[in-house]
Amino acid sequence: MFNPSLVKTMVIALFITKLSTCINAESAEQGPSYQNAVTNLSGSSPSQVWENFTRSNMDEARALVAPQYYNVFTASFPPGSELLKKFQVESEEIFGDVARVRLVTDITIGETVKKFRGWLPFSKDTGHWKLTLAEKPVLEFLTKDWKVEDIGPIKYHTKSGLSQKLRADGLRFVEEFRRLSANFRSSLIHLDYYVASNEEEAELLGIPFNPGGAQARPGLIKTLDDASHIHELIHVFRVDVGTTNTFLEEGLASALGDGYERITSAARCHETQALLAQGYVRLFDSNEFSTATFAGKPSYEGARFLMEYWLDQFGLDKVLEMMVLAAKSPNETVQIISRTFEEPSLTDQQIQLRLNAKCQALSAEVNAGPT
């Protein structure tokens, strides 16, 4: 069965964070190497900027990414990494001072290889094209003929208008938005929500045409035929305090937001055990997490299982406290977890015990057969 989590890390810079630094301050600290990067790598088109980013180093990449999103791109997908070479430029479209570059890659789902198409937004900064995560200016061009309907603080964008079912789901989503906004102490006042209803619209928005296909961006959510995607709402709320690593962020969104990353078979359970056997901290590394996801391993299931353990043992408030601290000091995440919860080695032991019990229960269900 298709697992929508497998395609989520295929889109560059899945997570978003708020940074207070500006490019001038950063460039002053970087010295001649940064200035050379601005001159040599900026490129004359958005697609050239992307190609340069895939070949750049961490210092050079500062010339290619809008400063408020630099940490996101380099943390999730390090410049010059092998992972980036999996994405090929398919086309680019320019709308004045904003643009999008469409990317295509192969993804493996079980034994099947499929094409996945997504796109990245770009904007002009001091005459140079730069990668950004601010999609709304591009979406305003792409969806200019779509209908807009407000339900409380949510502004829904659809090609043909909300169906009765989607409108009812939207009303429930507003209640969840308000409840979770209070839990997360979010400053978000309203949200733009784009809903695709077919493959053409999904491709326009840059989301997978599969059940659960969705993305979160600053101040907006994009989904396929879903007006109440809590998983992506969690990601949007996390922007207010900054984000940690992909493993923790997906774990939180999966545990609180949806059922797609649940472990539902004994085989998948044993795969999760194997993935976490070397310790969950290993998956804090973006390359480790992305490589596992590309290979079809249960990286999202493992992230959710860990987060559910923490929620059971320590509660939501304590988990959010840890996430806020880790976002402020990402290099100290392991120490923050140890102080807030327990040593990772103790958690690893508890996770393996819980997974043993889970795997045995799922195996028993298979052996028992239908009732």
Image (cartoon, rainbow, N blue to C red):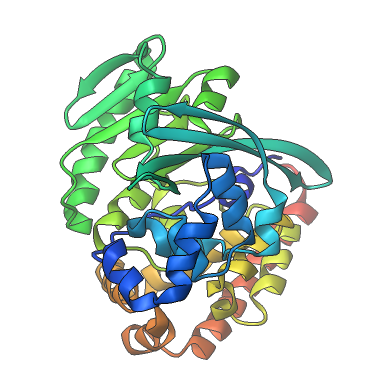
Residue at x 19% of width, y 46% of height: 188
Out of 34 and 354, give the one closest to the viewer. Answer: 34
The image quadrant that residue 229 belongs to is top left
Out of 290 and 210, give the one closest to the viewer. Answer: 290
Residue at x 70% of width, y 67% of height: 360
Residue at x 25% of width, y 26% of height: 155
Out of 99 and 247, give the one closest to the viewer. Answer: 99
* 267 in relation to 134, above or below: below
- In the rendered picture of this protein, how many numbered marks are placed on residues? 0
The image quadrant that residue 72 belongs to is bottom left
Report the quarter where the C terminus lies.
top right
The image quadrant that residue 226 belongs to is top left
Residue at x 73% of width, y 36% of height: 115
In the rendering, at what x and y percent does residue 71 appear? 41, 65
Out of 102 and 169, give the one closest to the viewer. Answer: 102
In the rendering, at what x and y percent does residue 276 appear? 64, 75
Report the quarter where the N terminus lies.
top right
In the rendering, at what x and y percent does residue 95 appear? 41, 26
Give the side of residue 43 with respect to residue 326, left or right: right
Give the side of residue 160 with respect to residue 59, left or right: left
In the rendering, at what x and y percent does residue 101 appear? 55, 36
Q: Is residue 2 visible?
A: yes
Residue at the extreme right of the image, as rendered = 111
Give the side of residue 149 with respect to residue 214, left or right: left
